[in-house]
Image (spheres, rainbow, N blue to C red):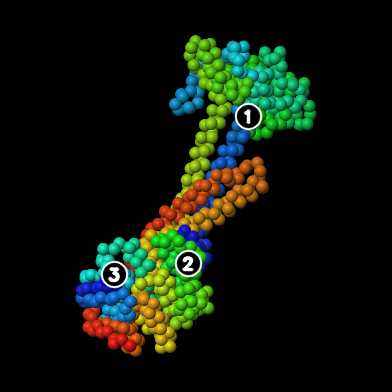
Amino acid sequence: MPIREILVLALESFLANKLRSGLTMLGMIIGVGAVVLLVSIGNGARNYITSEFEGLGTNLISVQPGRTDKKTMGPPVGGAKEKLTLADVDALERQSLNLEAVTGVMFGSASVKVGDRTVNTSLLGSNEQLTVILNIRIQAGEFFSPEVESGRRVVVLGFNVARQLFDEENPIGKLVKINGSEHRVIGVTAKSGQSLGFNMDDLTFVPTRTAMRLFNDDRLFGIRARAKSRVSVDDAVAEITEILTHRHNGEEDFTVLTQYSMLQTMETILGMLTYVLGGIAMISMVVGGIGIMNIMLVSVTERTKEIGIRRAVGARQLDILKQFLAEAIALSLIGGSIGLLGSVSLTYLVYLAAPKFDMRAPVWIMIPAFGISALTGILFGVWPARKAARIETIDALRFE
Amino acid sequence: MALIEISNLRKVFRMGDEVIHALDRASFTIEEGDFVSIVGPSGCGKSTLMNILGLLDSPDEGQYTLEGHPVQTLSDNQRAELRNQKIGFVFQTFNLLPRASALRNVEMPLVYSASYDRSFSPVKMREMALQALDRVGLSQRVAHKPNELSGGQRQRVAIARALVNRPKLVLADEPTGNLDSKSGQDILQLFERLNSEGVTVVMVTHDPKIAERARRVIAMLDGKITEDRRRAHS
Ligand SMILES: Nc1ncnc2c1ncn2[C@@H]1O[C@H](COP(=O)(O)OP(=O)(O)OP(=O)(O)O)[C@@H](O)[C@H]1O
Ligand SMILES: [Mg+2]
């Protein structure tokens, strides 16, 4: 039987039972719609996080004290004897060829007080190169200069911290008390906003040695560096490892992480999440498929006489099978297309309403959406179609 | 070579304890070009016989040879091909597809013929179907659905469907049973014309007047052939 005729028959039967076909398709519409929506949301989340990461700069490298188990990728385990020092930072700064900027960092919490106002903030100790590494912009005053780095009592306030302490007043030159000791404000950062749930505007910056004195500790929290370019990141990592291992008597008691490797890990996790979501949505496709199978079985019974007539004038079993299979596939494909169209439009509408979170369905989603629809039609249509094909001609003709 | 040759055909139906011999060692041959009518009381096995001749059903025992091929040895697909290419079957109850127009009903066998002959284009199918409808005098009713046609017209659509593939053999199971005598006469004339063009016609009928128009009359009783007479040529 020619394809054209099979399609005409499928369409005729579809139109002859519009309401029933429509209700049957509902399962497919919802199924495909759910798959497309969940995959789009997963995909959108991944794109969002990737772009946030890239905003931080993919040239970023961090060194943490302690070894990381390469297999489990667990966090570095810092012991008392494994430590990174300012001397390590100096060595990197002098010897490395691939680093644009490098700083040792101290990190901890501190209370910042002026008059009767107190703000509890995270305190970040670093040298002047931090602005290059983290893209920090200064709104008023200046960041530390190399000369002030060696432990003077100066502080740069994050945008929000400055607001909370001084309102609209200009804080430059004012004295604030950090954990009880006085520091002079030399700068305020420009508003940068949230990224990855972390807000630079809430930080307080002091020179590294100043932080060491405040925390009474000479071990660095870590080292942050920026490679000269994206392509030199790997070289930079190798270089850092070599220099530090040499300095630590041949022992690799630290861990070098790159923004890029973190991004990759993140992408893997989110990619997996997308597939898991899609997989869960697939369950609704099964429900849609069962709906199709159900209605096809009803249709086969209802049309037993027609099957008999067709067989009597020369239809082979295969012809009957094709006819009913085509009908099941038509149902699932039309349902799938409507589901696809609906869900894709929905993601575009959401994008129009909230452009920040772009969860527009990717173009490639069409391929699995159609593929899965067709497959569902075949999978759930083949049994009713076989049943139709195997009815004895004479029994089918006698059927009333 | 005879077109149809049956020998000792048996068909048994069991309804609970009751055993019905719908066909009981029925044998005969029909030559190509003959016009045969089969008569007998209700329930004597006429339809059972016709269904077997039309390859819609199989006998329990006995031989059926169609154009020299023993039918028992044919596959399901080969039987379908023979039904499509060689046999036109006309049912007492028309058996038209209720949702399809007269034209679509008549085209239907051709759709399956396309499997055997690739030259069957949609245009050619349409042309053949229109021709067949024209032969039964229904060229004015091609777009009508069966429920928009009279009984006689419906049967003519069914006959057009049986003729559309130019079969060698037309089997008609009480084609006039559901029609008034005027319509019955029209149908009969159609068969006579077909037969004069060389098509072999086998027709079941209750009506003795109609049976007498055939060249040969086979009478049945309780599944057996009881009489087989050839009418003196007129
Ligand atoms: N599928 C079946 N199951 C059981 N019995 C059947 C079946 N088909 C036919 N019979 C029986 O076989 C016998 C012959 O039936 P058949 O239909 O061949 O008769 P017929 O000569 O065509 O009768 P009529 O003139 O009323 O059409 C009948 O007794 C009938 O009850
Ligand atoms: Mg009968």
- Are marks 1 and 3 in one subunit? no
- Specify the subunit that label 3 lies on: B
A336 vs A45, nearest the viewer:
A336
Left or right side of A45 for A166 = right
Q: Which residue is disc 1 drawn over?
A: A56
Left or right of A341 on screen, residue B104: left
Q: Nearer the viewer, mark 1 or mark 3?
A: 3
Quadrant of the image containing the C terminus of chain A = bottom left
Which of the labelled discs sits on residue B125, or is there none? Answer: 2
Secondary structure of the residue carrying tag 2 is helix
The answer to whether mark 2 and mark 3 are in CB contact below 8 A is no
Residue A198: quadrant of the picture: top right
Q: Which residue is mark 3?
A: B66
Q: Residue at x 49, y 39 (%)?
A: A272
Dot 1 lies on which element? helix
* Residue A155: % across, % down: 70, 21
Q: Is mark 1 within 8 Å of ligand 1?
A: no
Vertical comparison of B51 with A260: above or below: below
Query: Measuring 75% from the left and 29% from the top, which residue is drawn there?
Result: A166
* Furthest residue in direction front, as rendered: B234
Is label 1 or label 2 in front?
A: 2
- Residue B8's spot in the image, x, y percent? 20, 74
Q: Chain of mark 1?
A: A
| Badge 3 element | strand
Point out which mark residue B51 bears. Answer: none
Left or right relative to A287: residue A86? right
| Residue in the image at 49% along x and 56% along y | A332
Q: Is residue A17 above or below residue A213?
A: below
Does residue B40 appear anywhere in the picture?
A: no
The residues bearing labels 2 and 3 have C-alpha atoms spaced at a distance of: 27 Å
Q: Residue at x 59, y 36 (%)?
A: A49
Label 2 chain ID: B
